[in-house]
Image (tube, helix red, strand yellow):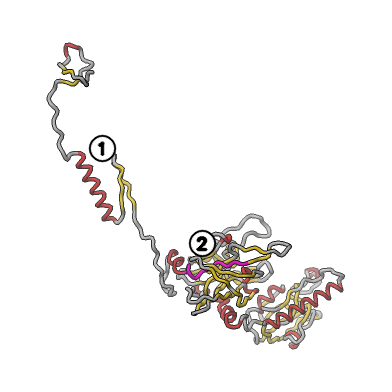
Amino acid sequence: MYYSDYNRPPEDREPIIETDQFQVHDAEPPKKKKKGGFGKLIAVGLCCAVIGGAVGGGGVWAASRFGSNSTTIYEGNRPTAVSLANVDGKTVLSAEEVYASNLGAVVGVNGNVTTNVWGQTVKNAVSGSGFVISSNATTSYILTNYHVIDGVSDIKVTFADGSSYDATLVGGEEENDIAVLQINQGNLQTVVLGDSDAINVGENVYAIGNPLGELTFTFTGGYVSAKDRSVTMSDGTVMNMIQTDTAINSGNSGGPLFDKYGQVVGIVSAKLSSSSSSEASVEGLGFAIPINDVKDMVTSIMENGYVTGKPNVGILMNDVDSSAQRYGVPAGAEIMAILDGSCAQTDGLQVGDIITAVDDTTVTSSSQLSSAVKNYKAGDTVTFTVYRDGQTTTVQVTLDEDNQERQEAMNQLQSDYQSQQSQSQQGGNYYYNFPFGGW
């Protein structure tokens, strides 16, 4: 075959030498290639890249092509461990540090719950969350929501390391949605309680919990959206709440809400999922109980099994019917029954009285009355403004203490009253009454 002179006329072609393998030009012998040329440049370039990567603290790998189209891809190195920061209330922690420093004190709470009409029970994966607030050599106490353990038996708590312990209920406070559990395991990590009054709107907050009962020990973050929100719960109870856009779902209830210092400032309690006027889902509206509102209650439950100093009036009450309001009867809480020997009886309240104010706080419903009274303690004297027989008057009442005995008496009073109403109304539901106890 021919090479460079293949297309030239025969008379102009240079002589060739034929071989058995192929034909080559009879030209000058080939020059020897100089060593260390382009290949050496490539080697030097790669060496420099490696050195540059080493100096920069990361690694590199190169995909090189001849010419000026060389490409270098850099790979960085970073530490994977997160230091366990000291939660001292002074040092602002990163989100990673908040999680790593508190994970060991957070638990999942589960138990047996009735699931069908035959009373059969099954084990939930996780029904809620909680956190260790105190631990000595033999015993640890865990705080959660009351609604997490309400109706649950054989309660167990599980830690992030997989350890699980049987838990017993020390006591609870349904109106404030708190409960304290006890486990026979000591020397556990505990959280640090912060100051919920000191947080600011716009401040970063974080939650650790078990959303959906399956995604255990999930970490979410957001902001304080609002403080001192009055939120009406499904049972009509009005609670003071921290509002946050931190992601909260079923299973998060009872878990801790941390501030930027890694301290617990709230107990995750509820999420607003929809409104009565719309079926659209609502996102970014979560609520937590301010820790300052329940610190004393938690201590009292741990020491006594119930909240001491909680006020009780000793009445059953109901909202004034709207039809009566059209005839000049004021809105308020009407007294339907009074417990014998209670402060309500001894201090002069009467069946049929309509309570319209507690001291300087106006009330227009039974739920507002209960919310107003729970701001007082047993032994405090309050002034009730009442509407009686067409006239407005005041009655001073020194509040009783609520306890197990009083609750049993109130439950009996409610049962007796409902039975009487059922008989007089031939089974009709003329009133639905709420025991005024525990506020």
Q: Is residue 174 magenta?
A: no
Q: Earlier in the sequence, mark 2 or mark 1?
A: 1
Residue sitting at x 18%, y 39%: 37
Which amino acid, by three-letter code, is at mark 1? Gly
Residue 244 position by quadrant: bottom right
The total number of labels drawn is 2
Tell me if mark 1 has few (under 14), some (14-19) or many (20+) residues whose alpha carbon lies within 10 angstroms of its own: few
> What element does badge 1 sit on?
loop
Q: Is residue 105 magenta?
A: yes
The quadrant in which the N terminus is found is top left
Residue sitting at x 58%, y 63%: 126
Q: Is residue 202 visible?
A: no
Q: Which residue is mark 1?
A: 67
Horizontally, is 422 left or right of 272 in the view? right
Residue sitting at x 81%, y 80%: 389
Q: Residue 67 appears at what percent x and percent y?
A: 26, 37
From what the image shows, is residue 414 above or below residue 209?
below
| Contact flag, marks 2 and 1 (Cβ < 8 Å) | no
Structural distance between the alpha carbons of marks 2 and 1: 51 Å
- Mark nearest the camera among 2 and 1 is 2
Q: Which residue is mark 2?
A: 218
Which amino acid, by three-letter code, is at mark 2? Thr
Q: Residue 39 appears at what percent x and percent y?
A: 21, 40
Q: Residue 24 appears at what percent x and percent y?
A: 18, 21
Q: Which residues are magenta?
A: 102-111
Mark drawn on residue 331: none
